[in-house]
Image: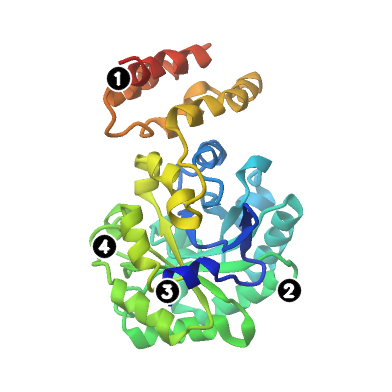
Amino acid sequence: MSETNLLNKTTKNHDVNSNSKTYNLNRFSVAPMLDWTDRHCRYFFRQLSKNTLLYTEMVTTGAIIHGKGDYLKYSEEEHPVSLQLGGSDPQALAQCAKLAQERGYDEINLNVGCPSDRVQNGRFGACLMGEAQLVADCVKAMRDVVDIPVTVKTRIGIDELDSYAFLCDFIEKVSANNNCDTFIIHARKAWLSGLSPKENREVPPLDYPRVYQLKRDFPHLTMAINGGIKSLEEAKEHLKHMDGVMVGREAYQNPSILAHVDHELFDNQLAIADSVSAVRAMYPYIEKELLQGTYLGHVTRHMLGIFQGIPGARQWRRHLSENAHKQGADLSVLENALKFVTEK
């Protein structure tokens, strides 16, 4: 499929509009990352790209149903935004999906990819790859109570269950009867024991060809690829084979990549976002958060990498790191930090 056709490809309930054009909601997204993609992070990313699909951190059904905090809180400006759920109880997932739809989320995503011990002990994450029928039941339970898309993020295998036949069987069972039509595939297997979550992101080898083959064998499904993608040039290559691309740590550590997404991947008539303007666009949001008791550093920690590779970037990071956590820190900290990258 050509890139032009991919650009125009849409899936029911999976499209967003920009300048009167329609795009696949999953064409480009930023991965859910624990302790990183919180609501402050997502609000900042939205200043850089209007079309990128943003994912929450994984939120467990237990936290939403029994927790004391508001785990579904987000800002309207974050749209399009997807809630990633962790759980394996169909009834609990359905309850949370319904709440998420009521709160206005654009998509629900089920985590079938996280390999951490804590997640396994809760019987969710990557270990669910070994229980395809349960995953199918979970997705169906959510689909039965919501109208927004319900998607699955998974690996290509777990432990010794890493054959292509195993992967195809998993996809076939979960997608049966139009149950799930969108998958995000992390192009690595996961080891459920012996490797840390960090090692599971690096040690198992990437197998992009296997994911491409999966898309060819399931052409009726929408599939995005994830894992090790570090540039928009790489993303464009993947889009020759896949419907979408999900980028994780690179987008967080070098957010300026997002400034080019709308122009490069959605519509070349759209402007490339200016990083300094994106920082200053955060000021009203930050002022409101400060009035509500949020520490400046809770927001600015997500902004440290925005000027990566630009003269003054190190001083920008240092100034924020040394001052944003202080009692009473306000917008003057950001303005002073910006001087390192703007006054040359």
Mark toward the viewer: 4 or 1: 1
Disc 4 crowd rating (10 Å Cα; few below 14, some 14-19, many 20+) is: few
Residue, disc 1 = 315
CA gap, disc 3 to disc 4?
Answer: 41 Å
Compare marks 3 and 2 and give the one earlier in the sequence. 3
CA gap, disc 4 to disc 2?
Answer: 38 Å
Residue, disc 4 = 194
Quick one: 85 or 175, which is closer to the camera? 175
Query: What amino acid is found at the position of numbered circle 4 in the picture?
Result: Gly
Mark toward the viewer: 3 or 2: 3
Question: What residue lies at 61% left-to-right and 72% top-to-bottom?
Answer: 11
Residue, disc 2 = 144
Contact between labelled residues 2 and 4, with CB atoms less than 8 Å apart: no
Disc 3 crowd rating (10 Å Cα; few below 14, some 14-19, many 20+) is: few
Quick one: 126 or 164, which is closer to the camera? 164
Residue 184 appears in view: no
CA gap, disc 3 to disc 1?
Answer: 43 Å
**Percent x, y of residue 167:** 40, 81
Compare marks 3 and 4 and give the one earlier in the sequence. 3
Compare marks 2 and 1 and give the one earlier in the sequence. 2
Residue, disc 3 = 2
Q: In the figure, is residue 116 to the left or right of 199?
A: right
Quick one: 35 or 76, which is closer to the camera? 76
Query: What amino acid is found at the position of numbered circle 1 in the picture?
Result: Gln
